[in-house]
Image (spheres, rainbow, N blue to C red):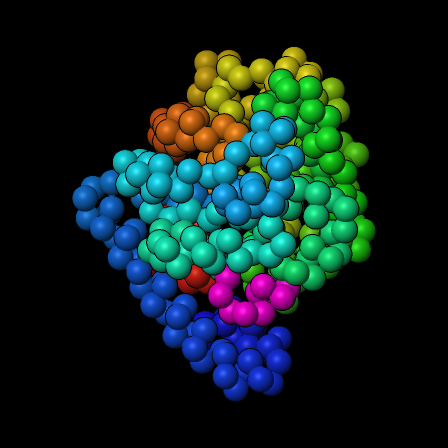
């Protein structure tokens, strides 16, 4: 029994222990074997497989149940198109975190359809059920995890400015604050620490937000946190501390903290502030030397990722091309493998890629 299954067994009810856990464990072994074959097949073809852990899934059923999704420019995920792109772009596995759904079930349904490519993932905290009642949201995620069917948790917005497409549409509803030290934040960090299940946070980079996050990492050292969008600074005047040296300090203090590289290209300007928000890059559009050195020295802590969402679905091949050509190509081959798939593999399976 791997560590994660053991943790889930420990939190399961006696009935689940007797009837469900052995079956769930068998299912996990065969799932991980199928994933390993898909990753290995890409390696055997001389490709660098990518495991994309940052993606938001909206099912057709969710769109029908929530007409507001379409009114605000959203749509359902085109699963058939994603399946084609995954093969064309050497995406081995993808974690689709369902938004606009009462539980993580849409992710399980996707996994049943395509068990070798989609990672069962709890809900994305990128819709109102999270902002309005984060404690209830985490309670549902805990119930999902207790089934033993999940491998990962979605992105949770603690501080989030409207994304570029929302800003362009004049939508301010996605200017989100959920107190990371509040009851929802505590429940989420505790859930991850207890189960060993990794989760993602969206947390803007600003001086005043750093101490609360550090306090949470300090209080929950076993929580598996992925801080999304490395170096994405929307309002530069609000950050004087964060940079490669600050992130190095966090990495040295918190052994389970990771960062993903889902950022825009170097020339991108975030319209509401007028800033080039991808501080990962230098003026020439290359990964800046300070960041390059940090990542090369701590290659286990960073992950390539797309930040796929249906509203900007057509950009997916560009996002992946950007990850590969502008980011991954800056690193040694061993580091590229870690960023592209080995670190994600460890976070979802609990074991190093071997
Ligand atoms: Zn995000």
Q: At which x and y percent is residue 310?
A: 50, 34
Q: At which x and y percent is residue 344?
A: 44, 50
In front of the other: 26 or 285: 26
Q: Is residue 241 above or below residue 59?
A: above
Res. 322 visible in picture: no
Please identify the quadrant where the C terminus is shown. bottom left
User: Is 36 inside the magenta-drawn segment?
Assistant: no
Q: Is residue 299 left or right of residue 325?
A: right
Residue that appears at 36% across and 37% down: 81
Q: Is residue 41 left or right of residue 296?
A: left
Q: At which x and y percent is residue 107?
A: 49, 53
Please identify the quadrant where the N terminus is shown. bottom left
Q: Is residue 98 above or below residue 222?
A: above
Location of residue 206 by image quarter: top right
Residue that appears at 63% across and 59% down: 141
Residue that appears at 81% across and 51% down: 182
Residue that appears at 28% across and 41% down: 87
Quarter, ligand 1: top right
Location of residue 99 by image quarter: top right
Q: At which x and y percent is residue 193?
A: 63, 63
Furthest-left residue in view?
45
Stretch of the chain drawn in magenta? 142-150
């Amino acid at each position: 029994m791997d560590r994660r299954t053991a943790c889930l067994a420990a939190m399961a009810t006696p009935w689940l222990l007797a009837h469900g856990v052995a079956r769930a464990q068998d299912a996990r072994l065969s799932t991980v074997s199928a994933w390993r074959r898909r990753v290995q097949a890409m390696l055997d073809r001389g490709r660098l497989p990518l495991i994309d852990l940052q993606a938001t899934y909206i099912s057709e059923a969710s769109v029908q149940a929530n007409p507001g999704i379409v009114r605000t420019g959203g749509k359902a995920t085109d699963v058939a198109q994603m399946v084609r792109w995954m093969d064309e772009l050497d995406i081995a596995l993808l974690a689709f975190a369902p938004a606009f759904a009462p539980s993580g079930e849409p992710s399980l349904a996707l996994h049943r359809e395509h068990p070798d490519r989609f990672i069962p993932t709890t809900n994305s905290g990128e819709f109102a059920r999270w902002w309005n009642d984060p404690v209830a949201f985490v309670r549902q995620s805990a119930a999902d995890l207790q089934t033993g069917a999940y491998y990962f948790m979605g992105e949770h917005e603690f501080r989030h400015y409207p994304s570029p497409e929302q800003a362009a549409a004049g939508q301010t509803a996605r200017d989100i604050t959920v107190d990371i030290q509040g009851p929802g934040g505590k429940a989420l960090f505790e859930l991850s620490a207890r189960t060993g299940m990794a989760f993602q946070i969206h947390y803007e980079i600003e001086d005043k937000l750093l101490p609360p996050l550090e306090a949470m990492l300090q209080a929950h050292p076993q929580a598996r946190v992925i801080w999304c969008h490395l170096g994405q600074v929307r309002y530069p005047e609000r950050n004087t501390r964060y940079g490669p040296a600050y992130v190095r300090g966090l990495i040295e203090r918190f052994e389970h903290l990771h960062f993903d590289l889902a950022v825009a290209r170097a020339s991108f300007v975030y319209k509401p502030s007028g800033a080039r928000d991808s501080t990962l890059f230098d003026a020439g559009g290359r990964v800046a030397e300070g960041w390059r050195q940090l990542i090369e020295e701590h290659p286990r802590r960073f992950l390539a990722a797309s930040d796929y969402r249906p509203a900007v679905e057509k950009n997916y091949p560009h996002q992946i091309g950007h990850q590969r050509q502008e980011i991954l190509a800056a690193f040694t081959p061993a580091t590229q493998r870690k960023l592209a798939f080995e670190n994600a593999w460890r976070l979802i399976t609990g074991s190093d890629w071997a």
